Image (cartoon, rainbow, N blue to C red):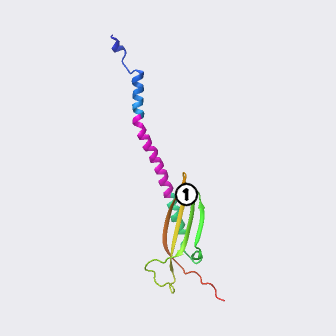
Amino acid sequence: MSRRERAAGFTLIETLVAFAIVAVLLLPLLRSFSTGMASTSRADAVDAATLVAQSTIESLTPDAQSAALTDFERQEGPYRVTGRITAYTGDGVPDTKNLPLLPYQISVTVSWPEGARTRSIVLDAIRLGPPPAAEPGP
């Protein structure tokens, strides 16, 4: 047997070079994986904030009592929910003096901390509700 036949296999240097090449090739893959995980986390936070805003709008459909409510603020877990109910004054709104229902705009802002900054979303909706109760006269 010759010396070449007995020395079949990889040397330590060849093995180290192979590991270095594999590490260099895997780094971009691992970086894209961690970026994807961070993006998924941000998307989950936006999705949850949107659900909080939608449920807040649904719970605030103006009735006789909430039509007088103009501003509100509350905390739901990590989310800070603020909003406003105002009379809608957009295009196409007729004279509302004799209408049994008036259009109201409900605007809800949900904000949450994300690292060093604060992110937020805003949802608006138009709902019909009763006119505000008239103040009793003297």
Q: Residue at x 58, y 73 (%)?
A: 70
Q: Is residue 7 above or below residue 53?
A: above
Q: Residue at x 39, y 31 (%)?
A: 21
Residue 115 position within the rendered picture, expressed as x and y whole percent measured from the top left: 54, 51
Q: Residue at x 41, y 37 (%)?
A: 26
Residue 129 position within the rendered picture, expressed as x and y whole percent measured from the top left: 53, 77
Q: Which residue is most to the bottom?
A: 138
Span highlighted in magenta in the image: 24-47
Residue 44 position within the rendered picture, expressed as x and y whole percent measured from the top left: 49, 54
Quadrant including the N terminus: top left
Q: Amino acid at mark 1?
A: Trp
Q: Please, what secondary structure does the residue beneath circle 1 have?
A: strand
Q: Is residue 12 above or below residue 44?
A: above
Q: Which residue is most to the top?
A: 1
Tell me which corner region of the image, top left, top right, bottom left or bottom right, holds residue 131.
bottom right
Q: Which residue is most to the right?
A: 138
Q: Please say whether residue 31 is one of the residues in the magenta stretch.
A: yes
- Tell me if 119 is positioned left or right of 13 in this view: right
Residue 43 position within the rendered picture, expressed as x and y whole percent measured from the top left: 47, 54
Magenta portion: prevailing SS class: helix
Q: Residue at x 56, y 63 (%)?
A: 81
Q: Is residue 135 above or below residue 82?
A: below
Quadrant including the C terminus: bottom right
Residue wearing tag 1: 112
Q: Please say whether residue 77 is one of the residues in the magenta stretch.
A: no
Tell me which corner region of the image, top left, top right, bottom left or bottom right, holds residue 30.
top left
